[in-house]
Amino acid sequence: MWIPNQKFAVMFASSSSSLRIQAIDQDKIVPLSTLTLPTLSRQVKISQISWCYDNSYIAMVQEGAHPHIVNVKDKRNISLVHTIQVLRNVTALCFKNNTKRFIALGTSHGDVHIYDTKNRSLSKKIDRFDSTVKLLEFSLRDNILAISTETSLFIFTDQANGANTEFVKDMTLPACTIARFHPSINELLAFGTMDGQVTIKDMAKEEEITERRHCDKVTGIAFTTDKKIMVTAGSDNRIFMSNLATHAPVFKMIIHTGATSLDISPDNSMLAVGLEDGSVYLYDIHDPLKPLHVPNAHSGPVYRIAFERGPVVMDEIRANLEKGSETTLNASQMSETQVEQLYSRGDGEKCQQDSVEMRMMEERLRKEMIHMVKNHMTYLERKLMEHCAKFQDFMDSEFSALHNAMARWDIFNLVDLPQIAQVIDNVDVKSMKSGMIRK
């Protein structure tokens, strides 16, 4: 239940050769945890990350290694809990949006599978393609799966959206560098290309709009959940913000180096951009001219940046920051550990799959209602403060004008009234005489 006096912060994860968790708290960026996996001879990039729907786990792909699942329930002490070893050469992954039991995995050999975190096994194979799978993306309701390879973008649909149904190929689109489903519109997909074009495709209405927004590779696409704003970024050092309904530009900016990834916070307040030089920029969407800058957030390019999927209670985190802000996973902690199953309920009781997924759906709906109420309350509070500030400025101006006007009449307190009356009479007499002379 949302408590008005609770203070929330926006939290995000970014990856390079390490995984970092940071929070935005009171216009400051607070580093919380860092997870660095040991390497033999070189820094290995973490090319993709994916939050599960309740922000308790992150799945990540490390180049040349098995994918990992990281426990991020304690944002100050994240840890590796599971390495997916049933599939080799994984190059892309994505949690489903409505359950943390299933993850889509793609390989360099073109295979795409659904991984069951409960049984720690592959539950089904989607398809096999003739080139490396670069990106996987589920739609809002998980019934559409976008699969990007080196040659094409494939759209698979699951009409029943059940545990035992099969995804079926629906359409094939041109090759892309990035693809993103809208977080609030199930059938709306946007994807960018190497030459800077961005296509918005509404599969429900069979409508498609293509625009050239960049002069180089498109590296990031994000939407606000309120269906108003779309943001793209590219290797051409540009960030482009537009109105989703009219496609009219809202804001354009040029940064000092190429963008590699971007995301928008679930409350539609912040835009995070990862850069080629390892920096992270965070912008207030309503005031993008004053970014928060994290120089050298990573030692190499930021390959992925992603906000958590809901508000975080920052008071609990802030209370523990005195103990230290960062943790690093060392080699002695790398062994496979026996941890709670990812599908378990919080009280430890195991449920049947249908019951679990129903609870997850109810919890997601509850969170969405909380987010909506919180967003509206925050918006109304901000507008009230703006109006109060304008009213205060108006009153200060009026009182100042009144004070100046009264000061001009202080002459009446400095001399006798009969003297003032005599001066006025003399002026009137002189005026009358001058008037008669002119006549």
Image (tube, grey):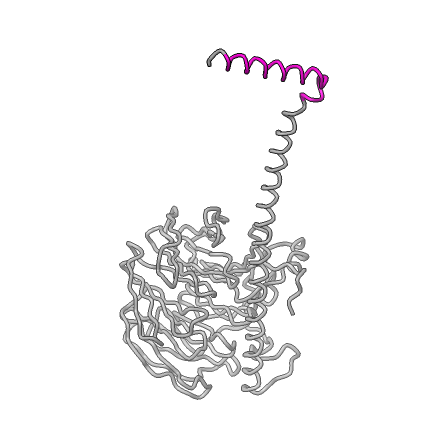
Question: What residue appears at the point 59 percent right and 53 percent down from the top-left corner?
Answer: 384
Give, as a single range, the part of the protein colored magenta. Answer: 411-436
Q: Camera-side residue: 323 or 237?
A: 237
What is the quadrant of the N terminus in the image? bottom right
Q: Camera-side residue: 291 or 74?
A: 291
Q: Camera-side residue: 377 or 150?
A: 377
Residue 77, image x and y in percent?
A: 60, 62
Q: Is residue 40 left or right of residue 156?
A: right
Question: What residue appears at the point 39 percent right and 77 percent down from the top-left corner?
Answer: 144
Q: Is residue 5 left or right of residue 362?
A: right
Total numbered circles: 0
Residue 100, image x and y in percent?
A: 52, 76
The chief SS type of the magenta part is helix
Q: Quadrant of residue 304?
A: bottom left
| Residue 432, magenta (yes or no) | yes
| Residue 332, magenta (yes or no) | no
Question: What residue appears at the point 37 percent right and 48 percent down from the top-left corner?
Answer: 254
Residue 78, image x and y in percent?
A: 57, 64
Residue 381, image x and y in percent?
A: 60, 56
Residue 79 vs 342, above or below: the answer is above
Q: Camera-side residue: 12 or 32?
A: 12
Residue 137 vs 167, above or below: the answer is above
